[in-house]
Image (cartoon, rainbow, N blue to C red):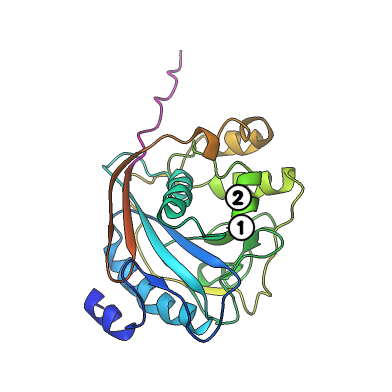
């Protein structure tokens, strides 16, 4: 798979990975945000599959790759907070935000990439989990919130460095703010995962279980309102917009004894 092929197959997509159908007026303007580092191989396949699906769904959308600068520990949720702000800075008319891992491809066009009355979890039946929801509070993989819903929960947590936990924290934020997660039927919400090894500098976060238990305490002070980062560069490619950001590094772990 090459980026040139993806470009050839999607001539209607505008520079920066933007598209809007000409034969209808979409009710939502959707920003699709992907947390990213060193996954160029997956990105080509993801774009190859997703652009045609989104066009068939007649979505008005823009795709933003939120690329973590440097080699410090990966922070998925903080990157998505950055993506929310930078997408709005690029186009203030976005009112729906879909947050997707770069290795997950939907298998059914009826799984509509749009926002709903309640926060949406799209990836309910992944092949790696035997096409079942792993547990009732699972909110990982691909999710969507309207601008209003996202701001209501103060965005996503910034303090989950490394793999795991942030999606459970987000689920807690949604529940604590009086909302409920909506999901498609499991037959529609099926996903295939593009195979990969776990990324370097994205090891499991040993503090994640403690943090998840404290969402009620932390969510007001940790989120979109407390986000700090440095924009390194932003540029448009034919099939996506790249946003490279320095989000810092995790705080040092407290020493024992």
The residue positioned 63% from the left and 69% from the top of the image is: 132
Q: Secondary structure at mark 2?
A: helix
The residue singled out by tag 2 in the image is 150
Could you say which is closer to the camera, residue 178 or residue 43?
A: 178
The residue singled out by tag 1 in the image is 146
- In the depicted structure, whether residue 228 falls above or below residue 235: above
Which quarter shows the N terminus?
A: bottom left
Q: How many other residues sit within 10 Å of disc 2, few (<14), some (14-19) or many (≥20)? A: many
Residue 154 falls in image quadrant: top right
Q: Secondary structure at mark 1?
A: strand
- Location of residue 26 in the rendering, given as x and y in whole percent from the top left corner: 57, 75
- Location of residue 68 in the rendering, given as x and y in whole percent from the top left corner: 33, 47
Q: Residue furthest right?
A: 178
- Location of residue 66 in the rendering, given as x and y in whole percent from the top left corner: 37, 53
The residue positioned 42% from the left and 47% from the top of the image is: 79
* Magenta stretch in the rendered image: 246-257
């Amino acid at each position: 798979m090459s980026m040139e092929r993806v470009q050839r197959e999607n001539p209607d997509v505008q520079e920066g990975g933007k598209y809007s159908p000409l034969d209808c007026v979409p009710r939502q303007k959707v920003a699709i945000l992907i947390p990213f580092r060193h996954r160029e191989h997956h990105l080509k396949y993801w774009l190859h599959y997703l652009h045609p699906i989104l066009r068939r769904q007649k979505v008005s959308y823009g795709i933003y790759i939120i690329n973590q600068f440097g080699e410090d520990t990966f922070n998925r949720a903080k990157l998505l907070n950055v993506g929310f702000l930078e997408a709005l800075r690029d186009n203030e008319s976005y009112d729906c935000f879909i947050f997707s891992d770069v290795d997950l491809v939907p298998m059914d066009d009826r799984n509509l990439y749009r926002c709903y009355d309640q926060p949406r979890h799209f990836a309910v039946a992944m092949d790696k989990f035997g096409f079942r929801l792993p547990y009732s509070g699972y909110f990982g993989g691909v999710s969507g919130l309207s601008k209003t819903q996202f701001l209501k929960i103060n965005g996503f947590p910034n303090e989950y460095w490394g793999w795991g936990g942030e999606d459970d924290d987000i689920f807690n934020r949604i529940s604590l703010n009086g909302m409920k997660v909506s999901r498609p039927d499991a037959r529609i919400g099926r996903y295939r995962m593009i195979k990969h090894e776990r990324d370097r500098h994205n090891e499991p976060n040993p503090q994640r279980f403690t943090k998840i238990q404290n969402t009620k305490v932390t969510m007001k002070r940790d989120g979109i309102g407390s986000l700090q980062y440095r924009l390194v560069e932003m540029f448009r490619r034919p099939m996506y917009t790249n946003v490279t950001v320095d989000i810092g590094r995790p705080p040092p772990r407290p020493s024992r004894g």
